[in-house]
Image (tube, helix red, strand yellow):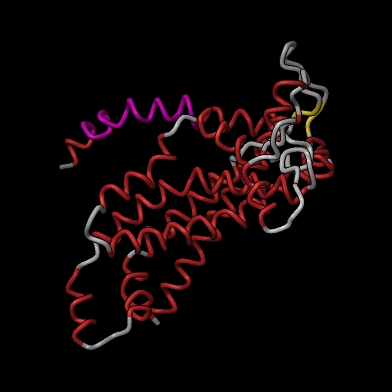
Amino acid sequence: MEKNNWKGWLYLLPAAVFLGLFLVYPLIDVLTYSFEEGYNFASQTYFGTGLYNYHYVLRDPYFLQALKNTLLLVLITVPLSTGLAMLISVGLSSIQKLRELYQTVYFLPYVTNTLAVGLVFMIFFKRTPYSDGLVNLVLSWFGAGPVDFIDGPYWAKMFVLCFYTIWVVLPFKILILTGALASVDQTYYNAAKVDGTPRWRIFTKITLPMISPTVFYLVITGFIGAFKAYSATNAVCTVLAIVLAVCALVFDIGFLPSLTVCLVWIVNLSAYCKEAMRYSKVGSKIS
C-alpha cells in the first residue's frame, strides 16, 4: 500500500498545482499587499509596511456604511429566503398533480437572463413620466401615496435590494430543499401517522431534523452570497461595490487588498459562527 502512495500524490498533483497557482498564491499575495502602505501597481513600489491600510479602511465612513448595508441585507434576506423556500418546498412536496409544472415555474427566475429580471423590476418600481410603476399602482388602490423606490428614501431602496436578492436566490433554495424533502424515508411519516401525530409536530420532529444539514448548507451559502451582493447606489452601497470602485477608480491600490481581506474575514467568520451553532446544537442533543 505504502509503495503505491506516490501514484495517489501524482494524481493529485495537477489539482494541487492549479489550486496553488490560482487560489493559495493570490491569497498570500493579497495578504502581503494589504500590509504595504502606499503601494503603487504601476511602479511596484511602496513607502512602508504596517497596519495603516486597515486603520484607514475601518475608519472610512463609506466602508462602514457599506458594511452596515451589507449586514442588514444579510440579516433580512437569508432568513426570509430560507423560510419562504422551506414553505414552498413543503407545499410542493405535499401535492401530486402538476408537481413538475409548479417546480418548473418556481425555478424559472433562476435561469432567467439578468437583463430580463432588471426590466421586470424596472416595471415594478421605476417611476417614469408616464407611470409610477406597478407597485405604486397597487399601493394607490389602498390610498397610499407613490414611493420613489429608486431615488427615494433609504428604506425604499433597501426594500428593492432585499426583494431582488430574495427573488434571485429563492428558486435555487426551493430546488435543493425539494430534493432534500424527497430523500426523507417515508417510514418515519407512516409511523407518525399511525400514532396520530399532528402535522406541525411531524414537521418539527421528523422533517426538520432530517433535512437540517441541507438547511445549514443553504444558510451558510446564503450568507456568503448576500455578502457578495452588488449595489452601487449611494445610500445602499454594499461592500463589494466599494471594493470594485476602489479597484476601478483609484490608481494607488494599497487599500484594495485590505478591503478584500476584511470582506473575506467577515464572510469566513459568519460561516464559522453558523457551523459552531450547528455543532453546539448537535452536541446538546447528544448529551
Residue lying furthest top: 43
Q: Is residue 14 magenta?
A: yes
Residues rendered magenta in the picture: 6-24
Relative to residue 10, is residue 172 drawn left or right? right
Pick the front one: 143 or 185: 143
Residue shown at the point (57%, 53%) measured from the top left: 77
Residue shown at the point (43%, 57%) measured from the top left: 85
- Residue 108 image point, x, y percent: 39, 40
Q: Quadrant of the C terminus?
A: bottom left
Vertical position of residue 98 compared to residue 200: above or below:
above
Q: Main secondary structure of the magenta part?
A: helix
Q: Quadrant of the N terminus?
A: top left
Q: Is residue 28 magenta?
A: no
Relative to residue 10, is residue 61 drawn left or right? right
Residue lying furthest bottom: 195
- Residue 139 image point, x, y percent: 67, 53
Relative to residue 196, is residue 44 drawn left or right? right
Numbered circles on residues, count: 0
Vertical position of residue 171 compared to residue 25: above or below:
below
Residue shown at the point (48%, 49%) measured from the top left: 221
Relative to residue 135, is residue 41 drawn left or right? right
Quarter of the image holding residue 183?
bottom left
Pick the front one: 1 or 102: 102
- Residue 156 image point, x, y percent: 72, 48
- Residue 100 image point, x, y percent: 25, 49
Pick the front one: 111 or 142: 142
Quarter of the image holding residue 214?
bottom left
